[in-house]
Amino acid sequence: MRSEAEGAVPDEEQTVTSDQERDSSDGKKKKQGSFWKELPILIGVALVLALVIKAFAVQAFYIPSGSMENTLQIGDRVLVNKIVYHTRDIKRGDIVVFNGLDSWDPETQVQEPSNPVSKVLRAIGGAFGVAPNEKDYIKRVIGIPGDQVKCCDAQGRVTVNGVPLNESSYLYTDPVTQEQNKPSNDPFEVTVKDGQLWVMGDHRELSYDSRSHRGDPGGGTIPTSRVIGRAFVIVWPLNRIDTLPIPKTFEQPAMSAASVALPATPMALGLIGAVPITYLTRRLRNR
């Protein structure tokens, strides 16, 4: 037979165990409640940080048209570096996003939201690169200030400062027929003014680019001040993740040498002409 003393120990142990379970249960409830209270704050902080990053460093953009195919497909999302042009100049071959408001007509017409909620969602989507924006464009830089861009030479190629571009690595190629776009169906010749850029899409037969805006005040070029940044990587969809490097054809030394020589030519001619004039002036003074 068990004594009362022998039975007391289990009763005390049971009491202690029950208290611990109750405390543990209360702690879990408090943690769960605290998490749901903090969640809106965490989301708000994340949104603020994302908007700060978007405003000053990196921004995602949605590709709404096929003007840059095959390099960029409709529905792709790219990340745009907004800092890079504070550390270096815009280079030929860069893929840039720029604001064309009041200068270029939009390539795609995006229907305006019909109610306030849709407008808010559209604004958030545009901020994070999951919705189209009709005033922003994405093109490849072909000519920078001082360049002479022309099409076409005897082989049908675009030339920059007389140097032909080999564009086969990025011009649109039909996935069925494997036929590649010509560099341009329309001839053109332009000297890019200071503070301007000549830009073209990789899908030349579809792109509404500098060639199509030659009647505009800039002669088809766009202001460097309107460039938002350089697209440097595709981040969506996952099966298309890739970098966007500058094609090697834009690294030809002769192209840059010709560009540098262009502004210097008038100065050189002026110096050559000044020599005989100076000589004659001195002869007349010595008489």
Image (cartoon, rainbow, N blue to C red):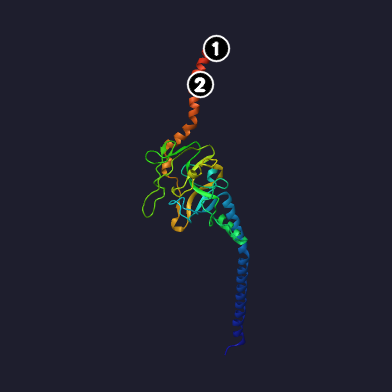
Amino acid on which the number 1 mark rests in the picture: Arg
Badge 2, how many Cα within 10 Å: few under 14, some, many 20+?
Answer: few
Residue 30 appears at what percent x and percent y? 63, 69
Residue 278 appears at what percent x and percent y? 52, 18
Q: Is residue 233 visible?
A: yes
**Residue in the image at 51% along x and 12% along y:** 283
Badge 1, how many Cα within 10 Å: few under 14, some, many 20+?
Answer: few
Q: Is residue 227 visible?
A: no
- Whether the residues at callouts 2 and 1 have beta carbons within 8 Å, the answer is no
**Residue in the image at 51% along x and 18% along y:** 277
Amino acid on which the number 2 mark rests in the picture: Ala
Residue 120 appears at what percent x and percent y? 60, 59
Residue indicated by mark 2: 274
**Residue in the image at 61% along x and 56% along y:** 48
Q: CA distance from mark 2 to mark 1?
A: 17 Å
Using the image as rendered, state which of residue 37 and residue 199 is in the foreground: 199
Tell whether 168 sits left or right of 47: left
Residue indicated by mark 1: 285
Q: Earlier in the sequence, mark 2 or mark 1?
A: 2
Q: Residue furthest top?
A: 287
Dot 2 lies on which element? helix
Q: Can you say whether 91 is above or below 285 in the image? A: below
Q: Can you say whether 142 is above or below 77 in the image? A: above
Q: Quadrant of the N terminus?
A: bottom right
All told, the count of numbered labels is 2
Residue 146 appears at what percent x and percent y? 50, 36
Dot 1 lies on which element? helix
Q: Residue furthest bottom?
A: 1
> Residue 185 — which label?
none
Using the image as rendered, state which of residue 83 and residue 36 is in the foreground: 83
